[in-house]
Amino acid sequence: MLRSASKFLLAPVLALAASGAALLVDVSAAHAATTSAVRGTVKVRTGATNSSAVVRTVKNKAKVSIDCRVSGQYVRGTVRRTAQWDRLTDGKYISHAYVVSKAAIPACPPPPPPAVASRPAMLPPAAMTGPTGTMTNAQFLAASIAPAQQSQRETRVPASVTLAQAILESGWGRSSLSATDKNFFGMKCFTQGSFASGCRVYVTSECTTAGVCFTTTATFRTYPSALNSFRDHGFLLANATRYAPAFNYTRNPNQFAAEIHKAGYATDPNYTTKLVAVMAKYNLYQYDVA
């Protein structure tokens, strides 16, 4: 009886194989979508940030079908404050700050590396350590030179600018952001990107265009290694359209610094002056790749 049943079950499968038809397997049990409700009127976007394009609006108490979760822009919503965004089954995103859900939502798999010609290559073994948060100033600079020079070879960002930004943004690697999460450039987490491992909220200082500075909180990228932080920094400057004018001055580090400041890299009105002062004081120009 068992052998007969097996024959009858196997026959349709063999028929499908012979005909060249695809045999579809239901994998929903392994990873089922989570159905949840929203509180308030919520915008569904193409990415995990409030600046991403809006594709539709979901009304209060409407149900959404969630596939998985990602880290994105920190949002204060009607349900909670969080940097989590939920990817819907159609590939669009909604902030978890507006989602009422008791079910555990799995993390989305990491995105594939971007197919861009300037995608940074692996650094040579001699540069595989990078700076840490426990070094002296001299040690920090020495450990940062190789990653900064490799970034210049790959992305054309002057090593002197990269070094000055790492020193200034991280306080020689001693800030909590750099010492704990290996973020040496104050890279914010509007999206996680391809080099970061997650996001974390920190207290930070921001300034208005009028030069009035204030304390606030922001979400910053976290990295598995210092090298990923250097790679992400160079990749951002080389591929973000707003920084394109700076690359007319790759042989003029001072002007390069002024251009990325002008494009909005930092809100501190004295950012260019501070960067140039650091480059001059420690003669960081000597590390630029010819």
Image (cartoon, grey):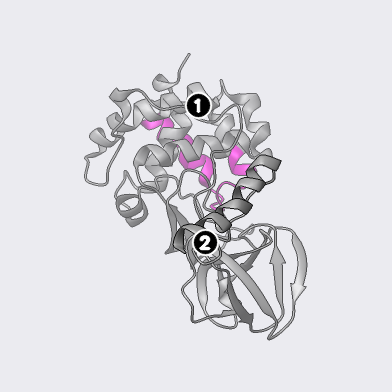
Query: Which kind of residue does numbered mark 1 sit on?
Result: Pro
Q: Which residues are magenta?
A: 260-282
Tell which of 69 and 207 is nearer to you. 69
SS majority, magenta? helix
Q: Circle 1 sits on which residue? A: 158
Residue 109 is situated, as x and y percent measured from the top left of the image, at 50, 53
Left or right? Give the position of 231 relative to 281.
right
The image shows residue 256, relative to residue 209, as above or below, that is above
Residue at image coords 30%, 24%: 125
Q: Earlier in the sequence, mark 1 or mark 2?
A: 2
Q: Taking 103 as reference, is 134 above or below it?
A: above
Name the quadrant containing residue 211. Answer: bottom right
Locate residue 40, reporting x and y percent: 68, 83
Q: Amino acid at mark 2?
A: Ala
Picture quadrant of residue 160: top left
User: In this image, 132 relative to 24: left or right?
Assistant: left
Asked whether the residues under the numbered discs 1 and 2 touch, taking CB atoms below 8 Å apart as contact, a structural biologist would say no
Q: Which residue is mark 2?
A: 5
Q: Does the stretch in magenta take in 281?
A: yes
- The residue positioned 77% from the left and 63% from the top of the image is 55
- Secondary structure under tag 1 reads loop
Which residue does the image show at 45% across and 62% down from the upper left? 2
Taking depth in this image into account, of 204 and 44 the one nearest to the observer is: 44
User: Which is nearer the eye, 32 or 160?
Assistant: 32
- Indicate which label's residue lies in the foreground, 1 or 2: 2
